[in-house]
Image (cartoon, rainbow, N blue to C red):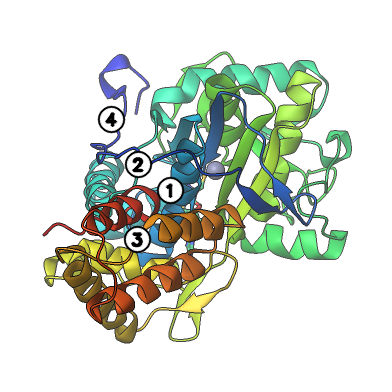
Amino acid sequence: MSGSADNLVIMRSWPAPEIVALPHHGGPLSVHDTATGSLRTTAPGATARMYVCGITPYDAAHLGHAFTYLTFDLVNRVWRDAGHAVDYVQNITDVDDPLLERAADTGQDWRELAEREIQVFRDDMAALRILPPRAFVGVVESIDLIAEFVARLRETGAVYEVDGDLYFSAAEAPGFGSVSHLDRAAMLELFAERGGDPGRPGKKDPLDWLLWRAERPGEPAWDTPLGRGRPGWHVECSAISLRELGMGFDLNGGGDDLVFPHHEMGAAEARRATGTHPQAQNYLHVAMVGLHGEKMSKSRGNLVFVSALRQAGADPMAIRLALLAHHYRTAWEWTDGELRAGERRLERWRAAAALESAPDAAPLLARVRAALAADLDAPAALAAVDSWVEAALGGAGGDPAAPALMRDTVDTLLGVALDR
Ligand code: 5CA
Ligand code: ZN
């Protein structure tokens, strides 16, 4: 396998849904920041900068993924509504062990597998009306960038070699623990569970992590100044976010399975490489969606796919409403009842939006804005719309402009289009 230019595919993201401007502006967004363990008001400049960890494309996109990307979509919408531009970057882990293993197990070419799943993901994101990132960046197209970043880390003296592979020394990681605040025993446990190799002989510390994997027979590898090989996992996100957004960007996030080791190790890399910190002002993590009592995960195979629901005829807006019924910090379980509840809600909202007149929707806009600004309380926003809808369908109000303002509010802030 070679790293020649013919496999350099610059990733496209997906088509953007239209955003309608609402009257006036919403207020600043507060979110629960993992690193400080507190509710913090985000304070972006004219352009808010957000990085979100993207998929490993061997099975995309299940409802857990959708819940995570929807959460950051709310961040995006609330910031825009508050008057900021948003510079949003997302990676794609399009070369990594789990993808290569799946390809090998199923006798597929790993590139074709990734390409196909990335396209399913794009289609799902577009159907769910998730705003696309400005930069949707794959690892395969970023090999040189990542190798340069690893070389830069090596120059700082934080890197050593084990049988040709390069490791970051946890002892040289400035501020290690400042994202997750876990004790060492918990770190060791999670590291073993989530792709780490605490037991590998030759490491100085079990927590030291892989930056660069030298070529193995049958595995993809690229020629770089580090030798032939491929990047480790965490370093892709620190290198890509640093190039695209710099240091101190406004929000770094993903599902809460990424707090440790992924975001801890990535933050340490960025800090060591640049000598500055923080990598991000806030770290936001989304609680896990489960199915049948366990986290929905590709390795467990207990998945419900957005694409399968869509193929079975589910309205993507009902799926979106089903997800919005949950707060991002509360783990929950998917059931068929979730989708049915989303469908019922969508029906009622559409009926109310189609009325000739309804109760003034300006207070509704204010309530939805306030709910989302307060740690993205989507369930509270839905409850506000529900009560307006109930009044409207009950015949209250005589404002002919109200249905349009309600539609725009729901469309722009919640991303739910009510036209059929
Ligand atoms: N490629 C890496 C990140 S660099 C990765 O974690 N890929 S993933 O495909 O496993 O997950 C993609 C995103 O969905 C991550 O942010 C992950 O934290 C999130 N995620 C995965 N499973 C769930 C779940 N069951 N519920 C909520 N979010 C999830
Ligand atoms: Zn990541």
Q: Which residue, given by chain and number where applicable, does mark 3 sit on?
A: 360
C-alpha gap between disc 3 and disc 1: 27 Å
Q: Residues within 10 Å of mark 1 (few under 14, many from 20)?
A: many
Q: Is residue 95 above or below residue 284?
A: above
Foreground: 158 or 182?
182
Residue at 18% across, 66% down: 315
Earlier in the chain: of badge 2 and badge 3, it is 2
Residue at 83% across, 55% down: 181
The quadrant the C terminus occupies is bottom left
Q: Is residue 1 left or right of residue 108?
A: right
Would you say the residues marked 3 and 1 are in contact, meaning their CB atoms lie under 8 Å apart? no
Residue 205 in percent (x, y) is at 84, 47
Residue type at mark 3?
Answer: Asp
Q: Which residue, given by chain and number where applicable, does mark 1 sit on?
A: 73
- Nearer to us: label 2 or label 3: 3
Would you say the residues marked 2 and 3 are in contact, meaning their CB atoms lie under 8 Å apart? no
Q: Which residue, given by chain and number where applicable, does mark 4 sit on?
A: 12
- Nearer to us: label 2 or label 4: 2
Q: Residues within 10 Å of mark 4 (few under 14, many from 20)?
A: some
Residue type at mark 1?
Answer: Asp
Q: Which residue, given by chain and number where applicable, does mark 2 sit on?
A: 131
For numbered disc 4, what is the local secondary structure?
loop
Would you say the residues marked 1 and 2 are in contact, meaning their CB atoms lie under 8 Å apart? yes
C-alpha gap between disc 2 and disc 4: 13 Å
Would you say the residues marked 2 and 4 are in contact, meaning their CB atoms lie under 8 Å apart? no
